[in-house]
Structure formats: C-alpha cells, structure tokens
Amino acid sequence: MTKVHNFSAGPCILPQEVLKKASEAVINFNNLNLSLIEISHRSKDFVEVMDNATSLVKGVLNVPDGYQVVYLGGGASLGFLISAMNFMKQGGKGAYINTGTWANKAIKEAGLLGNVDVIASSKENNFNYIPKSYNVPEDADYLHYTSNNTIFGTQFKSIPETDKMLICDMSSDIFSKPIDVSKFDLIYAGAQKNLGPAGSTLYIIKEESLGLTGRVIPSMLDLQIHIAKESMFNTPPVFPIYVNMLTLEWLKNLGGVEKMGQLNRAKADLLYTEIDRNPLFEGFAKTEDRSDMNVTFNLTDNSHKERFDLLWKAANINGLNGHRSVGGYRASIYNALPIESVQVLVDVMKQLNT
Amino acid sequence: MTKVHNFSAGPCILPQEVLKKASEAVINFNNLNLSLIEISHRSKDFVEVMDNATSLVKGVLNVPDGYQVVYLGGGASLGFLISAMNFMKQGGKGAYINTGTWANKAIKEAGLLGNVDVIASSKENNFNYIPKSYNVPEDADYLHYTSNNTIFGTQFKSIPETDKMLICDMSSDIFSKPIDVSKFDLIYAGAQKNLGPAGSTLYIIKEESLGLTGRVIPSMLDLQIHIAKESMFNTPPVFPIYVNMLTLEWLKNLGGVEKMGQLNRAKADLLYTEIDRNPLFEGFAKTEDRSDMNVTFNLTDNSHKERFDLLWKAANINGLNGHRSVGGYRASIYNALPIESVQVLVDVMKQLNT
C-alpha cells in the first residue's frame, strides 16, 4: 500500500500493528474461532480485555490509589454532562475556563444543570491563547478546563492551581506525555485521538469526590454505578475498548508516556521551527501556548494556496485542512504519527519557498 | 477454522461476509490506504457510510414519511433515559408493561424523571408470559414495552393497542421480521443482536411527537438535536455503524425482513418442536408467548445435565447456558444463525434421549 501521511484531527492515525491485530480479532479472536464482536461481553476472554485495558491505564499514567478507571460510550460530549452531573452540587456552581469550541460545549451542558461561572476566556482573540489569570470563586464546586484545544491548536502547559475540585477534558492530549493524576478529581477523554477509535470514552475518577452533589443521577450518567459495575453496567463498546487495549500495549512497549512525550516534543519542534523559519507561513496560536498535538498555521500570502495544496496532496498527505473556525492548516501530530510524516510535510513547506 | 455454532444472547453471531468486510476495512477502507477507524467522520467516505446505514433502515423496515432514523451510542440502557426524557411531559406520566429485566430497567430510569405507572407485569411467574390485559391510563403520555425479552424468552406477538404515544425497546428482535413502524412514536434498539456489534443504538422517531415535554433536555439526550445533526452532533461510533451498514446490506440482499421472518420462524419451529417432543426437555416460556429469537428451556430431570453439557460442547456449540435469573438453557437464534446450527443442537437433544 502507498504510505499515507495521516494528519487527521480525530478520528486519527493509529499504530499499524494495532490495526493489524484489531483486523484479525474481527475474524478470529484469541483463537476461539469466533469474532471479537460476536462473543458475550461477560465471557472470560472479553472480561480479560476490559481488565487489561483498565490496568494499562493505571500503569501507564501511574494512577494513584483511590482512583478508579472506567470506559463508557458517548464521547466527551456525554462527558460534558456526566462531569457536571456528578460534581456540581444541587444549587451549586461550576467554574469553567473557555478555551474554545469544546470548552464552550462543556459550559453549555453544565449550564443546563445549574450555575456556571466562566472565569476566563480567550474568545476575544478567537481562542489563540490560553488564559493565565483567573480566580476560582469560593462557592464553586469545581474548576473545569480543556487541556488541549484541537481546533485552535492551543494547550495548557501546566495544570491550573486551585483548592477546588479539578476536572479536565483531556480528550486530545491524554497519553501524549506524563501527567500528575493526583491533581485531578476527574479526567475524561474521548478515545479517538491517542487511545483508539471513536465510540469509547475514558474516565479516571477520584472515588472519594463522588456522591456529594445531592442530585438524582440517571444510572447511565452515574459514575458510582459504572465504577461498581467495572464498566459493565450495560454492554460496553467491545471493539473500541479492545483497540484501546492494543494501543496502550503498544504505548507501554514503546517506553510509556515519558518516551512518548519526548517523541511528540521532537515532532512539534520540527514543525514549529519550519513555521517560524519559513516566511511563507505563520503560526495561529501564541507561541507559549502552542499545542504539541495540533499545529495550526496559515500562509502569509494566500496566493500560494493553490500550489501548496497541490504539493502536500501530491506528497500523500491527508487531513491537513484547518477547521472552518480558524481556516488555514492544521497538522494533527498525535502519538501514532511518525516523525517521518512530519518531515515530509516540512519538506513540502520548504519546497514551496524555493 | 472449526465451525462454532454460536448461540450467544448478545453480542451475538454476525454474518461471516460482514465480519470479513469489516476486518478488511480496519486495514484499508474504500481503497484509501487508510483504516476506517483512522479517518475523519466528516470525510466523504464515512458520511456515505452513515447515509447508507440510515437509508437501509428506512428501506428495509419501510419507514413512513415523517419518521427519522438516527444512530447514537450508549446502548438501550441510555435509550431508557432518552425515551423518557423526550416523551414524558414535565409532571407527566409514562405507562409501562413489565416483562422482565430490561423492561424493569426502563421503568427505573423513567421513575427518576417523573411518574411511572406499571400497568401490567408478569413478575409473579418469573416473567414466563406476556401480559395481555391492561388499560393505559388517560393521563399517560405514552405506553412503553419491550418487544422481546432475551432473558426469559418471551415475545409480543402483536403490537399493543393504544391511543397514546407508543414506545418500544426493540433491541432483540428488530429486523427479525416485518414491523409496522407507523404504529410507533419511538422505536429504539441496541445494535448488538441483529444489527451489528455493541456500541451503537438505533432510534426510529416520529418527528412530530418530539418537543412536547416542556423539559430542559441535555444535548446528548435530545433526539431533536441528533435528528438536526444527522447522527453527527458528536463523533459517532464509526466502526459499529459501518458494521450495521454491512449487516443491513446482507439482510437486504437475502430478501429483507419478510424472508428473514420466514427463516427465523423455521429455526424456532425446529427447536420448539424438539423441546415439546423430547420428554427430557421442557420450555420455560408459555407456548403462545415464545420468542423466535431466544429459546429458553430446561431439562426435566437435572441428572442429565452433565451429559447434556458434554454433548453440546463436543458439538462445538457456544453460548447455550441460560441466564442466572432463569437457569437451564437459552438458545439465541438471531438472524445470522444458520438453521444448520439449530439442527446440530436438535441432534444433540435427540442423542441425549437415546
């Protein structure tokens, strides 16, 4: 097969060896002569998958005691609701940092349940930076933020300081580098970036922070129920969870999140260096807030657009168009994207300037 | 590979040709040299999958004008909540028929939102029959029922008559036979029986019945939002939906739900005839309410258990143990199970009686 350099923003590139094993399991899983997707989720073979997928998260992220890991469906979009439902007290308040589209959606869903205080926003500059100055109100139940903003290409470089509970939507940079899980009460992440295909969502939960809201919580939105049932309250999304497990095995064998962080840094450096060097390009996000996952950039002179688009397409590059809210280009350089693909893009950018 | 006769209750057997195509798409989808699970859900190639998966439902079930079809995540368990949230008026009431575990879970979730009237139940006989006598109260917003009860092996043979809105959880018998969609305001179905793998849920919605509750509905639970966004409000469960599409193509090519209904009837007849003929076995469900999808039966004399279990396992039969609420055996004979597999089971039952 011709090699495609897949810069898609998500669903996105996954490791080739993961795809190969996943493809095989759809035909014959664990030599059962049955497909992974036609066996009971209560069977020994699948329960083992779920256990592994959970243990790998704990191991790879060094999750402390007192935290629980569950996999649910619904994506981060359901996470916006689940996080507010499980952490905002009846009549209470959530504090939010608005760093763009996804943060904004989280704010909207929480606002349907109670009071929301948007304590900082970079909206006035089309979200090209991460706000750094804010106060979390005394009466807030929690602070919610989005660690990486796929659309705008910004990323928190440190964890916000607060004495309130801390909730993070980490959909687009979880597993890209080490994180200190002990700082958080809830981390949630749609799988379809560094973890696996669309259709499952990871929750890492400080157990003692649950059960404090006084709310009636529907079962499927209740993290305590999902913890008690070990992600098997209902039939889980079997195939996505299996692929998550494979991806985490790949990540662990490769050297874990420490090593991954180094590789991702090198890829981002290579690309940002070219953006800064090449007079035909300019970055969208403020330098200090640039994302290591989604690199957003524009042409300085749009008359080069047609030629640039021809060049990168001819180089078998896929998924480089920017999101409509930003325009220009976006190179998503998630875990599974090799640095060789970034080099191909950089070479095309250099070629445009000759 | 050795042929396995897969009688699993769900996730369950899927057509071999579907599994083959799904496996291939995980490596190389539509000759893009990219995996199905690593491309954007907004790409032309995937939007086409979603459109086909939706059109096939409309075609196969002869869905009338005024109805919309959407695919969501979360399984029927989220459907319990979504159905009540979108159809029970603020301060209103839902009428429910309790035919077992799943109906009961629907009742529980609706009860968290408002008033629930359980107008009929077969609980006193461990749900071995379908209640036929009931009145839907005048002040009910809707009647909810579960068309087929996987655990107990019972099935509604006709659609309940009511002048209220009608909601059905059809998870375990949708696409097994023709249905008159025009009788319903909402049909929902977890995919993992006759449609595809776990991880997606089908909703068939009479559009004019929505928007009448006066409730604040969170976005991910709001069917009007999902209809407006054509199942793409958030990233959909890509792989499960693709497999749904393949299964519906298989079903259509095979002759549709008319033909499927005949095949399923023949399989059920073959097995029930043996249960009734063979003095070593007895059916669990009342004869007139027996399910064509899940055949529940017991040994009349448990001293044969060890030998029977050895015999069916030696015949490469999988997934025959009954649910713990019923005991005995359960043969799930969904669409993709060939009659040859049922014959193998019947032969084993005959063999036990020699």
Image (cartoon, coloured by chain):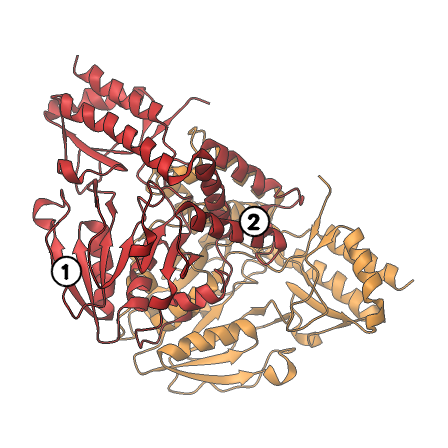
Chain colours: A red, B orange
Residue A335 vertical placement versus B349 (above, below): above
Q: How many marks?
A: 2
Please name the residue that numbered disc 1 is placed on: A118
Q: What chain does mark 1 sit on?
A: A
Q: Chain of mark 2?
A: A
x then y, percent, for residue B337? 66, 52
Observer-nearest of B13 and A266: A266
Q: Quadrant of residue A72?
A: bottom left
Q: Is residue A215 above or below residue A102?
A: below
The crowding category of the residue bearing disc 2, from other C-alpha atoms within 10 Å (few below 14, some 14 to 19, many at least 20), is: many
For the residue labelled by badge 2, is the local secondary structure a helix, a strand or a loop?
helix
Q: Evaluate if marks 1 and 2 touch, with contact meaning CB atoms under 8 Å apart.
A: no
Q: Earlier in the sequence, mark 1 or mark 2?
A: 2
Tag of residue A37: 2
Residue type for callout 2? Ile
Marks 1/2: CA distance?
Answer: 43 Å
Q: Position of residue A166 (x, y in %)?
A: 26, 59
Q: Are marks 1 and 2 on the same chain?
A: yes
Q: Position of residue B258 (x, y in %)?
A: 59, 57
The three-letter amino acid code for the residue at tag 1 is Val
Residue in the image at 26% along x and 75% along y: A90
Disc 1, SS: strand
Left/right of residue B351 with respect to residue A121 in the rendered view? right
Q: Quadrant of the N terminus of chain B?
A: top right
Say which quarter of the image contains residue A66.
Answer: bottom left
| Residue beneath the point at 20% across and 28% down | A272
Image-quadrant location for residue B264: bottom right
* Residue A273, image x, y percentages: 19, 25
Eyeballing the image, is B338 above or below B98? above
